[in-house]
Amino acid sequence: MLSRLHPLPKLALCLIWIGASLLVFDLQFQLAALALAFFLLWGVERIALWKLLALMVPFALFGFGFLTTSVLFQRDSGYAVQMAREQGALKADLSPGLVLFTRVLACGMISALFALTTDAGRLVRALMHHLRLPAPVGFAILQAMHLVPDLCREMQSLRMARAMRQGQGLRRIPRPNELMALVIPLLAFAIRRATRAAIAMEARGLHPGSRRSQLPQPGMTPLDFVASACGLLILFIVLHLI
């Protein structure tokens, strides 16, 4: 359902929620934002629970220092106390480190909500069509998006060819010497792709400042306005209740 929404209103709504999470120093609000993003990904988009938990690991590690100093050692760091004081939320029953930890998780899951429900190519085309993103920049971003998975597939093909030539099994995790041997072939592959992309962009007439036509892009539908209004309404209700 969320993947059918127009990327630009969805991006604006996610940025509004992230901005509110950064401005509101309240544990209840951070938990509400985290729970809402988690529910939309798990309950609405049907993303596997283990994938969501794996996505939370990097964000949890980023804020783990605040959690350990607050919960285990019962002493908040100077940075956490300063953040709470600057935002006017330093209370006796409030742990600033715990709030910062949940804030990292909330912002991370909101970002993951946008990334997992938005087609990157559609986002770039919408930026080019509606926000006048320069065509060379947009096509360069699209080329980079296609290059990364192609580079991974090329590395896997090279590893399989090396294993067959040496008569060995393919290891799940490559050894350091194997990675070093793949650097030059992968670099050559990336240079060839970049050269072809440059020729293709030149053939398309993607010169800086030149005018060009664009294919019509899907516009915003009533569903986009309804979803944006619901997101803002939920944000207003949560801010009113805390």
Image: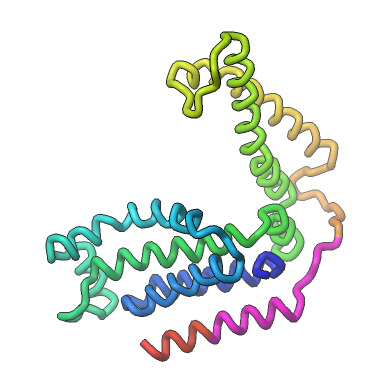
Q: Tell which of 4 and 100 is nearer to you.
A: 4
Q: Residue at x 60, y 67 (%)?
A: 11
Image height of 215 relative to 201, above or below = below
Image height of 59 relative to 221, above or below = above
- Picture coordinates of residue 106 (x, y %)? 42, 67
Q: Is residue 125 visible?
A: yes
188 sits left or right of 95 in the view: right
145 sits left or right of 39 in the view: right
Q: Tell which of 196 and 158 is nearer to you.
A: 158
Q: Tell which of 49 and 132 is nearer to you.
A: 49
Q: Residue at x 65, y 44 (%)?
A: 145
Quadrant assignment, res 45: bottom right
Quadrant assignment, res 2: bottom right
Q: Which residues are magenta?
A: 216-233
Q: Magenta part mainly helix, strand or loop?
A: helix
- Picture coordinates of residue 14 (x, y %)? 54, 69
